[in-house]
Amino acid sequence: QQQVKQSPQSLIVQKGGIPIINCAYENTAFDYFPWYQQFPGKGPALLIAIRPDVSEKKEGRFTISFNKSAKQFSLHIMDSQPGDSATYFCAASMTSGSRLTFGEGTQLTVNP
Amino acid sequence: EPEVTQTPSHQVTQMGQEVILRCVPISNHLYFYWYRQILGQKVEFLVSFYNNEISEKSEIFDDQFSVERPDGSNFTLKIRSTKLEDSAMYFCASSQGSGTDTQYFGPGTRLTVL
């Protein structure tokens, strides 16, 4: 019930494409959903986050779409660039807790 | 920009040996965490620490693991008797508050148990 499922495992797009990464959760007590970006040799870094009271959040080229009834959320990267090539993790947590529960990660490659 | 630092970047040890992984969290942060990532698998929560005590721990964090904040800046993870399956990347993180406050991650320590 604590799991967060993420897909796809890897994704290759051309520059300018719109990669979409999907996550699904089971625990309805989760109320905070961040996305982390990780470059090789670095720790995960917060990219964007959403709470379940909104269905979409946009920051720059990154957008989270959230479907509370389906218990799913996704990350869209508009006008993707080679510099966006990284591993992306979705995560979930509870306001009352402290642990982040991560998805399996998606390795994104944006070709020039 | 302040960042979480971790040492060493890579630790190789023999099975059964004790290891201590060190972290310096961001200076005004009050909550500290350890996560691990076994190669090819997801990042997993181990433990959170606040006010000099464990606030939450996962099933992975058994009696072989301990955490300590020995002084005002360091936060350590000790594994008493390492097993082969402890080989992983260990990430330290810190945050100002709990709940939905952003957790800032260090670059990780790669632990290899032979």
Image: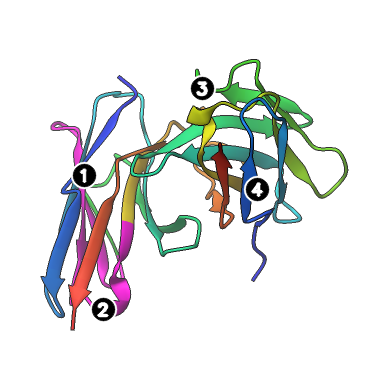
Q: Which mark is residue B25?
A: none
Mark closer to the chain start, 4 or 3: 3
Task: Tell me what residue is drawn at x 25 percent, y 52 percent.
Answer: A106
Q: Secondary structure at mark 2?
A: helix
Q: Which residue is mark 1?
A: A73
Q: Nearer the viewer, mark 3 or mark 1?
A: 3
Q: Which residue is mark 3?
A: B60
Q: Is residue B11 magenta?
A: no
Q: Horizontally, is B50 left or right of A21 in the view?
A: right
Q: How many residues crowd mark 2 within 10 Å: few (<14), some (14–19), many (20+)?
A: some
| Disc 4/disc 3 C-alpha distance (Å) | 25 Å
Label 1 is placed on what type of residue? Phe
Which residue range is magenta in the image?
A59-87
Separation (CA) of disc 1 from disc 4 = 26 Å
Direction from residue B15 to residue A52 in the image, left or right: left
Q: Can you identify the residue that label 2 sits on? A: A82
The verdict on a common chain for dots 1 and 2 is yes
Residue annotated with mark 4: B96
Quarter placement of the C terminus of chain B: top right
Q: Position of residue B102 (x, y in %)?
A: 52, 50
